[in-house]
Image (spheres, rainbow, N blue to C red):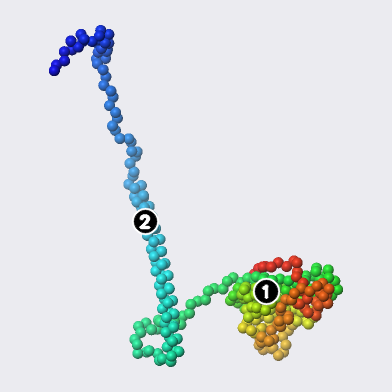
Amino acid sequence: MRLDWRRLAAALPPVVFAALSAAQSAGGGTAAPPKPEMALPDAGAPVSETAALRNEVADLRDDIRLLQQTLDVLVNQMMADLRAQNELLRDEVGRLRAQREALGLPEPAFVPRPGAEELEALLLEAPAPPPPAPFAFTVVREWGRDPETAAEIGGDAATLKGLIGAVPPGSSREDVENLGRELRAEYAGYDNINIEVFDDPEAARAFADDEKGGSARRVLSVSRHRASGRDTILYIQEGKAEPVAFEGADPPSPDGAGGTEVLEAAEAPSEEDTLPAAPPTQAEDAEKADTEGDSGAEPNPKSVKGRKKR
């Protein structure tokens, strides 16, 4: 169907027709709407090849580090399992050997055993003992009468220093003897000294509680008694006590010349000398200070429990 523009123009109101005519004459027709921009946004400068290679190398290093950590964990786990199996095999071989020796069976030399020499070496190789703990002296109990307290009591009241302490298990004899010399020199101003040292803290606490337990673990005794003139440092091992030389000690007797004097357990400090007694009253203090030595002490209010000494 063909549209007749003349009839359409005649049908339109005059005002609308005039407006259309004016717009057509001014702009030559209506302008089309602008088209939207379809271009992609700017992606920035392209990445150089050097930067790309650097990023790839960094990623590879991270992957290698992760693989190395995983491998370390697996290897450590495998080594721990092998060590555990080795200990089990060693115990089993030792048990079978002890059983064979107990039954009096001969060595099964007719059985071929590849690597028998290596096996013998492993059986003879005992695991190394753990290293001893750093040497330290821990005070478990402390009592006594310092010079100030003795001066307050007056008379001929004697001073006393008592200690019960512990050193780490397995401490060397040299360290224990040096500790005895240091303690003897530190309390040289006291008339009576009673110091007992154990190589087990539990034994020292037991001895401090009931004054009897733990004696088997005693390793050092420092004793000084003004009334009897006793002044000794004893290193104790397996029930035997050996005197320790220190500055100011009495020279050894001629009987002990030519070797170290070894004292049997019966000659070690007696229980009366080494066990701390309950504190007496002040009235009994002055009378018993010289006659009973260590048993005539009252607790020192200035004492500090739990002291550690190198």
Residue 246 locus on image (x, y percent): 70, 78
Q: Badge 2: how crowded within 10 Å, few (<14), some, or many (20+)? A: few
In the rendered view, does 154 fall on the left or right side of 21? Answer: right
Residue 207 locus on image (x, y percent): 66, 76
In the rendered view, does 255 fall on the left or right side of 227? Answer: left
Residue at the disc numbered 2: 63
Nearer mark to the viewer, of 1 and 2: 1
Q: Badge 1: how crowded within 10 Å, few (<14), some, or many (20+)? A: few
What residue lies at 80% left-to-right and 69% top-to-bottom?
A: 149
Quadrant of the rendered image containing residue 170: bottom right
Seen from this angle, which residue lies furthest top?
Answer: 14
SS under mark 1: helix
Q: Is residue 15 above or below residue 55?
A: above
Q: Is residue 237 above or below residue 21?
A: below
Q: Between disc 1 and disc 2, whose residue precedes? A: 2
In the rendered view, does 177 fall on the left or right side of 95? Answer: right
Callout 1 amino acid: Asp
Quadrant of the rendered image containing residue 261: bottom right
Quadrant assignment for the N terminus = top left
Q: CA distance from mark 1 to mark 2?
A: 62 Å
SS under mark 2: helix
Callout 2 amino acid: Asp
What residue lies at 72% left-to-right and 87% top-to-bottom?
A: 253
What residue lies at 52% left-to-right and 76% top-to-bottom?
A: 129
Quadrant assignment for the C terminus = bottom right
Mark carried by residue 209: 1
In the rendered view, does 44 fall on the left or right side of 193? Answer: left
Mark carried by residue 299: none
Q: Is residue 189 visible?
A: no
Viewer-nearest residue: 300 or 54: 300
Callout 1–callout 2 Cβ contact below 8 Å = no
